[in-house]
Image: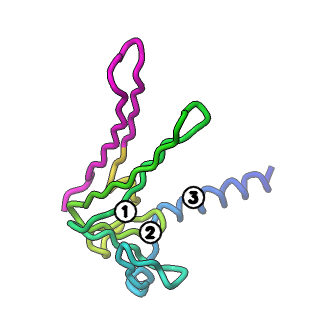
Amino acid sequence: MKPITTSLLLSCMLVGCASFPPSAKKLAALPIVTYPDKPASADYIYKLPAGKPIDLSLIIDGSALNQNIRQSLSTSLVHDIYLHKYWASEDARHWVNARELISINFNMVLPSYETPNPGEIHLTVNHKLSK
């Protein structure tokens, strides 16, 4: 019974540690790579700058389709977003889990008996925290 309790305790401790961002000192020492630049090092902070175009690819494919589709789209953010693994920040100093900063919801409706209209793909990206 003791090995099970010890490994359970260790697992809980590791999960708990994963809920805190790396130290401010560690993050401050990392290079900041601004989109669309590519990182030159293994560990870095990736900045998505406000007001600058962010390119996206929309891909619709599959065996049920007669033709696959790939479209290029572009949008921009209202606030700067700094990303490090699954952590996010608006100022590169105060970090939260990325899910706490931005919410992303995806909805797709295909033409059907209930909705005999053109299909719709709707991606909603909302800011969750205020400065």
Name of the residue lying farthest toward the front: 66
Read off the residue under disc 1.
Answer: 96
Gap between marks 1 and 2, in whole Å? 7 Å
* Residue 20: x %, y % from top left: 45, 65
In the image: residue 8, left or right of residue 123: right
* Residue 67: x %, y % from top left: 52, 38
Q: Which residue is painted at 33% across and 38% down in the image?
A: 122
Over which residues does the magenta segment extend?
105-131
Vertically, is 4 above or below 93?
Answer: above
Vertically, is 128 above or below 29?
Answer: above
* Residue 29: x %, y % from top left: 42, 87
Gap between marks 3 and 1, in whole Å? 16 Å
| Label 2 residue SS | loop
Which quadrant of the figure has residue 83? bottom left
In the image: residue 59, left or right of residue 91: right
Asked if marks 1 and 2 touch (Cβ < 8 Å), the reply is yes
Q: Which residue is painted at 40% across and 50% down in the image?
A: 71
Vertically, is 25 above or below 76?
Answer: below
Read off the residue under disc 2.
Answer: 21
Question: Residue 15 got which mark?
Answer: 3
Q: Which residue is painted at 34% across and 48% down in the image?
A: 103
